[in-house]
Amino acid sequence: MPPKGFPPARQRLQEEKTMTTPRTVLITGTSSGIGLATAVAAATAGWNVIATLRDTSRADALRAAADAAGVLERVQVARLDVTDSASIAEAVSGVIAEHGRLDAVINNAGVGQLGTVEQIGVAPFRSVMEVNFFGVVELTLAALPHLRAVGGRVVTVSSLGGVVGQPFNEAYCAAKFAVEGFLESLAPVAATTGVSVSVVEPGPVASEFVASLGPSVPGLIENAGPYAAAFKAYSRTTEALFDQAQSSADAAAAVLGVLTAEQPVFRVQTSGQARELAGIKLADVDGSAVQAFTSPWLL
C-alpha cells in the first residue's frame, strides 16, 4: 500500500502495477553479511531482487545462499560501485530497462574504519564518506524519480553508530551521522510525493564487515601513541560486545520488515540492545548520558 496521503490517481496506478508486476528492489553490498541475508530474505518474500556488488566475482556466497533457499531465479546479480556515478546510473537504468519499474532501494553497502584521527589522518575520513554517505546520496538521487512513479521506498542500513558517537570510530560514525541527517531531512519531503524513507540501525552484528575494518588492531595499538591504553581497553570491550552480536539474518529480518511494512516508520533498530542505546542518546539533551555510557569502554 502507498504511504498515507498518496495522490489518488497515482495510488490507482500503483495498485494496478502491484497486482500485475512483481515488485523489484535494488540492494547494494550483497556479497556478505546483512546485504546477502536481506537479498535472500526479500527474494523469499516474493520480490525481484537486483543484488549489486562492486565486484561481481564475489557473488558465489550470495548465489549459494539463494539456491539453498530455493529463490535463485529471483536474485539477479549486477555490478554497482556506489563511489562511481556512472556505475550507479547504469545499474538503475538497467533495472528500469529490464523490469520496467523500481519499487525500492536498500542502501546497504558500507565500509568501516577504526582509529582516532591522530592515528589514521584525514584520508580515511574522505574514503569512508565516499562510500557510506555520498554513495547513499547518489543512489537515492538516481532512484527517486522511479520510486515516485510507483510509490516506492528508500531503506538505508545505517548503524547504531549513526546515532551514538563511539570511541575510535570517528570516521565511521561521522559518515553514518551524515547519512541519518540527510535521510531524516529528506523523509518528509519525499513523503509528499508518495515515497517513504527509513533507516535501519543495527548494533553489533556477526559478519565479515567486522573483519574488514581497515588496519589490524595490533597495528593500531602499536601506532596509538598516547591513546594506546585506551585503544587496548576499547578492543577488549568491543570483543565482548561482538561475542553477543546478533546474526546477519536477524538484522536482515528487520530490514525486510521495513521493506514490506504498510506504513514504515523512519527509524528502526534491529535488536533490544540497539534500541536501548538509541533511546539513551535520543533523550540525552546535553550529551552526558552517552559520555557516561561510552567512556568506561576505554578504562
Image (tube, helix red, strand yellow):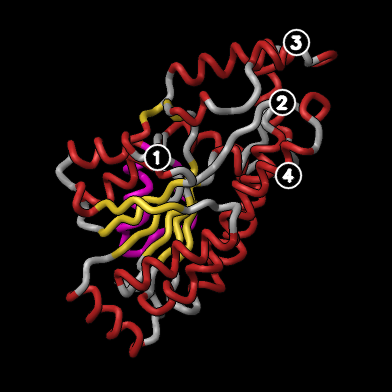
Sequence-wise, the earlier of marks 4 and 2 is 2
Front position among marks 2 and 3: 3
> Which residue corresponds to the image point at 54% horizontal and 42% vertical from the top-left?
110
- Where, quadrant-wise, is the N terminus in this rendering? bottom left
Give the x, y percent position of residue 87: 52, 59
Sequence-wise, the earlier of marks 3 and 4 is 4
Which residues fall within the magenta stretch?
Answer: 251-269
- Where, quadrant-wise, is the C terminus in this rendering? top right
Q: Residues within 10 Å of mark 1 (few under 14, many from 20)?
A: few
Measure how far apart labels 3 and 1 are at the Cα level: 35 Å
Q: Residues within 10 Å of mark 3 (few under 14, many from 20)?
A: few
Sequence-wise, the earlier of marks 3 and 1 is 1
Give the x, y percent position of residue 130: 65, 49
Front position among marks 3 and 1: 1
Front position among marks 2 and 1: 1
- The residue under label 3 is 222
Three-letter code, disc 2: Gly
Front position among marks 1 and 4: 1
- The residue under label 1 is 57
> Which residue corresponds to the image point at 52% horizontal and 68% vertical from the top-left?
142
Q: Which mark is residue 115?
A: 2
Label 3 SS = helix
Q: Which mark is residue 167?
A: none
Measure how far apart labels 2 and 3 are at the Cα level: 12 Å
